[in-house]
Image (cartoon, grey):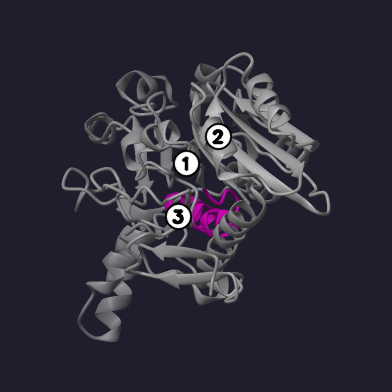
Amino acid sequence: MPRFTIKTLNAISHTGLSRLPKDDFEVSSDAASPDALMLRSANLHAVEIPPSVLAVARAGAGTNNIPIADYSARGIPVFNTPGANANAVKELVVAALFLAARNIVPAASFAHRLDGDAASMDKAVEAGKKAYVGFELPGRTLGVIGLGAIGVEVANAAAGLGMRVLGYDPQITVDHAWKLSSFVEHVTNLDQLFKRADIITLHVPLVDGTRGLIGAEQLEKMRKSAVLINFARGPIVDESAVVDALESGQLRAYICDFPSPALNKRDKVVTLPHLGASTNEAEENCARMAADELRDFLTEGTIANSVNFPNASLARAEGTSRIAIANSNVPNMVGQISTLLAEAGLNIADLLNKSRGDLAYTLVDVDGEVPDSVMAEIAAIDGVLSSRVI
């Protein structure tokens, strides 16, 4: 009988689910008491999840459809799949660069509406094409806001196209910095990026600090007739301010992945139906990564790519039982746990404690089996959010 049950809330690629061995995992869309949830776009904010849930994994990067604070309070790690869809989004952003530079969408619409015989069409083409004169990308300046997995790939691709590239990210990781092309200029002042860039593309998550990041004040600082590209999240941009900037000529074009009533059928706007990660390859990559994250967490207590808990990995000592504890990041937590284990006569073979902000995570390998009574005492420690024996 499988040890763990995973409930899927959206259709998940079978390529990803195949990474969950059937001897250990049962995958179901209607499990009543699952050990974990796997989803893509399902909104969990108004959903009461069962007390059996130990972890949640989103097969995608953004997690604004998940009430992370609520799950953190229950000791539930929330996983995402950063970088798994990076190439898919990068390709679409590169396409957007050409859409904006060469006026491809309005030009194609113009051509689509032509009728008459060949001679009249030729005449209309010659007369009409002047309205769609564009510009070439080499020598133009692209500003990339957010240098995560996607932002780095976009910046590198643009540099390869001969563009001057400015990158802004005050929290860029060492790994992403290593992957960034030496031709990308890392700027530390966002205002300077606005003033220098011909095209700006956004690659930041939707959080309180980025909601409305691009508003009237920022648009006013941009170069006249700049282009704005948004394949991150719609609310990062103030749509009404964008509409005003388009009408005044401050913005040349706005290309995004988020149709809305305010943007629909407007000149100088191209909206796509949230196609950023909509490739078979991206869906498979995300599913594989999410499945791996849940498998490793449920079977070994390993945490990787959690948006709320720290990364934690501990090689398991042979012949031991592993205790996994999610707790508040407060003093003497490890001391209290160690004391309880010592009083129960349980020897600690290895221990790992990691923290991230207000949260911490502890793995303890002990010789022999851990009695239920000891786990009850650990669960009763003030600040322990969840605990289990693996």
Q: Amino acid at mark 2?
A: Ala
The residue identified by callout 1 is: 76
| Residue interval drawn in magenta | 80-102
Residue at the (35%, 39%) spot, across then down = 67
Which mark, residue 326?
2
Q: Residues at badges 3 and 1 in contact (C-beta under 8 Å)?
A: no
Say which amino acid is labelled 3: Arg
Q: Tell me: residue 323, above or below residue 18.
A: above
Q: Residue furthest left?
A: 261
Q: Nearer the viewer, mark 3 or mark 1?
A: 1
On the image, the x and y values in percent for residue 154 come to: 60, 47
Earlier-in-chain disc, 2 versus 1: 1
Mark 3 lies on residue = 102
Q: Is residue 101 magenta?
A: yes
Residue 58: percent from left, percent from top: 46, 53
Tell me, yes or no, whether the two marked residues, 2 and 1, touch with CB atoms within 8 Å.
yes
Mark 3 falls on what kind of element? Answer: helix
> What crowding class fits label 3: few (fewer than 14 Cα within 10 Å), some (14-19), or many (20 or more)?
some
